[in-house]
Amino acid sequence: MEKDKCVICGDAMPDIRRTANATPVREGRCCLTCDNMMVTPYRLALAGMKGQELVLNLVKSLQEDDNLNIRLRKGKEGGQ
């Protein structure tokens, strides 16, 4: 995958400052949405977080992701 695309979803990442390390999900850089939706929860699970603690940390991560709200709106508009 090209270095300017998320290694998880393939979306363009025009600004390296709005990317994250995708390890341990994949090698390379990912968009912040994938980081919050997949990488962070996976890391928290590996660290032993369970149930409510895992959910609370995931929600906190999602609330900090401005990009997620835009992507969710696009999905709703597209009939998804």
Image: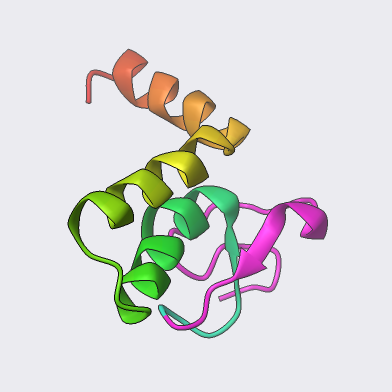
Q: Which residue ends up furthest to the top in the rendered image?
A: 77
Magenta stretch: dominant secondary structure: loop
> Residue placed at 36% from the left, 62% from the top?
41
Q: Which residue is painted at 68% across and 54% down in the image? A: 13
Q: Does the magenta stretch include residue 14?
A: yes
Q: Exactly how many numbered labels are in the figure?
A: 0
The reply to whether the magenta stretch includes residue 16 is yes
Looking at the rendering, which quadrant does residue 46 occupy?
Answer: bottom left
Describe residue 65's horizontal placement relative to residue 79 as left or right: right
Q: Position of residue 18 (x, y in %)?
A: 73, 52
37, above or below 50, in the image = above
Quick one: 76 or 2, which is closer to the camera? 76
Q: Where is residue 47 in the image (x, y as percent from the top left)?
A: 37, 79
Residue 2, located in which quarter of the rendered image? bottom right
User: Which residue is at a point 80% across and 52% down the rendered structure image?
Assistant: 15
Q: Quadrant of the C terminus?
A: top left
Residue 43: image location, x then y, percent: 41, 74
As drawn, is 76 to the left or to the right of 74?
A: left
User: Which residue is nearer to you in this view: 72 or 5?
Assistant: 72
Span colored in magenta: 1-24
Coloring scheme of the render? rainbow
Question: What quarter of the picture does the N terminus occupy?
Answer: bottom right
34 or 62: which is nearer to us?
62
Q: Which residue is drawn at 69% across and 73% down?
A: 3
Question: What is the x, y in percent for residue 40?
Answer: 45, 63
User: Residue extending furthest left?
Assistant: 51
Q: Answer above or below: position of 80 versus 13.
A: above
